[in-house]
Image (cartoon, rainbow, N blue to C red):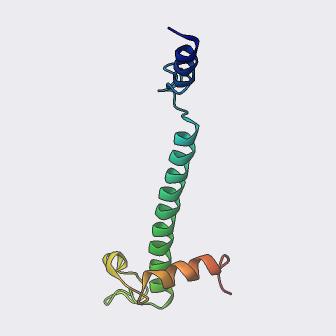
Amino acid sequence: MTDREKNIMEAYGALEPDGNRLFNASNVNHIAWSLVVLLLILAGWLGAALVNAENQRNALMTKQCQDRVFKAEVDKSCLLTVRSREHWWQHLSYGLGHLSPEK
């Protein structure tokens, strides 16, 4: 092998992938993105709970679930199915905007 061929082989040899570092992967990004996904799921769950609680609170305040026989009582089966506002986002915006009860 001549010196010229040796130089060409060394130049192409530097282009070969390093077998030791080829399959190493960092788990840092996986942990961070997993945490982001979990926090988004938690925020969605808390938002759904807030919408449900605000729907029932508004139904109680406007007396939409008053018992027909006993006027001082609440119909609990009505609270499970009542829609006190037209859209869910109205409950969410009211619940996020009013942190303390009205006087």
Asked where in the image residue 11 lies, by quadrant, the reply is top right
Asked whether 1 or 25 is in front, the reply is: 1
User: Measured from the top left, where is residue 47 in percent x and y?
Assistant: 50, 68
- In the rendered structure, the answer to whether residue 97 lies left or right of residue 23 reads right
Residue 9 in picture, x, y percent from top left: 52, 18
Q: Residue 75 or 2: which is nearer the viewer? A: 2
Residue lying at the far top of the rendered structure: 1
Q: Is residue 21 left or right of residue 80?
A: right
Residue 81 on image: x %, y %: 32, 79
The residue drawn where x is 54% and y is 10% is: 2
Residue placed at 56% from the left, 42% from the top?
29
- Up-down relation of residue 34 to residue 3 (above or below): below
As displayed, is residue 8 above or below residue 74? Answer: above
| Quadrant in which the C terminus is drawn | bottom right
Q: What residue is rendered at 61% in x and 76% in y?
A: 96
Height in image: 42 above or below 71?
above
Q: Is residue 29 above or below residue 65?
A: above
Viewer-nearest residue: 63 or 7? 7
Counting the numbered discs, the total is: 0
